[in-house]
Amino acid sequence: MAKSSEHHDFLPPEARVALERLGEHLALARKRRREPLRAWAARLGVSVSTVTRLEKGDPGVGMGVYAAALWLVGRVQALPELADPALDQGALLISIREAEGRSRRRARAANQESAS
């Protein structure tokens, strides 16, 4: 069986950087609140080493732990917006192309009907 760390080798560099920045921001939020690692670990229900890994942006830390940490700093409401379908540019482009294709087919069909 593959080690879980091997799965993280497939993480795109941009995603790795984003997790590292998130971890840095959470570490800064904890420090600005003057909360020790042990206190945060207890509030999150995880070990001190997990909080340390979270603050380094370790992709092996569960999404639930990141979500709980965001809740501690009052930012959990931002999570659903990360994958908001209204902001999915790739899907929007596909929808536009499909709509353009339908309108072209309709225009061709209308032209053929008027020509006959």
Image (tube, helix red, strand yellow):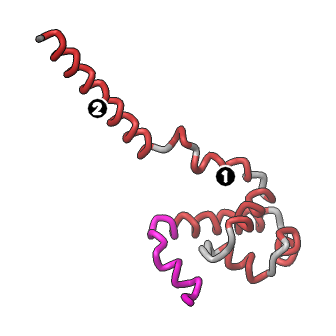
34, 63: nearer the viewer: 63
Task: Locate the C terminus by quadrant.
Answer: top left
- Image quadrant holding the N terminus, namely bottom right
Against 105, residue 27 (above or below) is below
The single residue placed furthest to the front in the displayed view is 116
- The amino acid type found where label 1 is placed reads Leu
Left or right: where 61 falls relative to 45 = left
> Which residue in the protein does label 1 denote?
79
User: Whole-percent x and y of residue 114?
Assistant: 16, 9
Left or right relative to 17: residue 99? left
For the point 63% across and 77% down, which residue is it?
A: 60
Taking depth in this image into account, of 85 and 74 the one nearest to the observer is 85
Residue in the picture at 69% in, 71% down = 62
Residue 92 percent coordinates (x, y): 43, 39
Tag nearer the camera, 2 or 1: 2
Cα separation, mark 2 vs mark 1, equals 35 Å
Mark 2, residue position: 101
Is residue 14 on the magenta stretch?
yes
Sequence order check, earlier mark of 2 and 1: 1
Neighbourhood count class around disc 1 (C-alpha, 10 Å): few under 14, some 14–19, many 20 upward = few
Residue at the (41%, 46%) spot, across then down: 90
Residue under the point 72% across and 47% down: 77
Query: Does residue 19 sit above or below 70 in this rendering?
Result: below
- Residue range in magenta is 1-16
**Does residue 107 lie above or below 2 as drawn?**
above
Q: Nearer the viewer, residue 24 or 7?
A: 7
